[in-house]
Image (tube, rainbow, N blue to C red):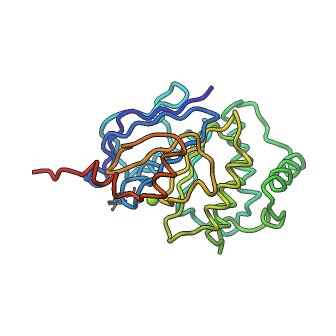
Amino acid sequence: MSQLEIKNLHVSIENKEILKGLSLTVNQGEIHAIMGPNGTGKSTLAYTLMGHPNYMVTEGEIIFKGKNLLELEPDERSRAGIFLAFQYPVAIPGVTVANFLRSALNARRRALNPEDKGLPILEFRKMLKEKMDMLKMDHAFAGRYLNDGFSGGEKKRAEILQMAALKPEIAILDETDSGLDIDALRVVSEGVNALSGPDLGVVVITHYQRLLNYIKPQFVHIMMHGRIVESGGPDLALHLEESGYDWVREKYEEVPEV
Ligand code: ADP
Ligand code: MG
């Protein structure tokens, strides 16, 4: 069983510490939600896991399948079976969703077996159609240029389709913070619900308090001031929905440095 283990992670951006001792363990087959108000470092965690060069890990470790994830380049992380969807995916005009997925998939297959010649095109198309049917997506979507003029919901749809095709062991989905984009959240949650099972571990990162209307995580974590301060089951998300974050803020008030 694959495992992602984050231990006492400290991360700085431009010498400002954003993550301050974050710990989290995610196993294949588990669905986790990380919730927290804006500015607590949720996206910083996602970018650090991706290997974004601006995010400096100053302390702690990230172990994926027994290996130090921090030593892997971003593309190696992806090929190793960790999937990261981003808040602001880039547009790639001229590259269709299908072609993008095919190169990503073949790269992942080659990482598992250097002799792999890639999935033959007909098999790839068949697989893609099956995944699109499972996710209730229009097949025409595969022929569009990746993220070019996509709505928030369509970007999420492209990410979920990528996740379905790549079959990662652990997926990190950072939810959009641009207002309450319910369409995007619905796409993500329907995708996660359709794809979840013993082979997939998921971390859904969101600031949206009514998460449970959409997704059923087994584990819910509250993030505040750069670390996870509370962990529990779905009841914790319910509590947040009823009471908001004020009680968390009060309980974990930051003491200003002198
Ligand atoms: P969240 O996703 O929880 O809203 P972020 O991880 O985006 O939080 O941001 C956490 C903190 O890091 C914020 O105070 C934000 O201003 C700061 N921050 C994020 N990105 C940068 C950056 N590129 N440069 C400087 N500060 C940043
Ligand atoms: Mg964010």
In the picture, which quadrant includes the N terminus? top right
Vertically, is 65 above or below 258? above
Name the quadrant containing residue 96. bottom right
Q: 66 left or right of 164?
A: left
Q: Is residue 81 visible?
A: no
Residue in the foreground of this view, choosing between 216 and 172: 216
For the image shown, how many numbered marks are present on the structure?
A: 0
Q: Furthest-bottom residue in view?
A: 149
In the rendered image, is residue 99 in sight?
A: yes
**Which residue is at 34% across, 48% downward?**
226
Query: Where does the image place residue 232, in percent across and percent down from the top left?
Result: 48, 40
Query: Relative to the observer, which residue lies in front, 249 or 181?
Result: 249
Task: Answer with left or right where residue 139 lies relative to residue 16.
Answer: right
Instruction: Say which residue appears at 85% left-offset and 54% top-offset.
Output: 129
Residue 95 position in % (x across, y down): 70, 63
Give the left or right position of residue 97, taking residue 68 as reference. Answer: right
Q: Quadrant holding ligand 2?
A: bottom left
Residue 154 place in picture, x, y as percent: 68, 67
Give how far across and how far down residue 180 sits, in percent: 53, 69
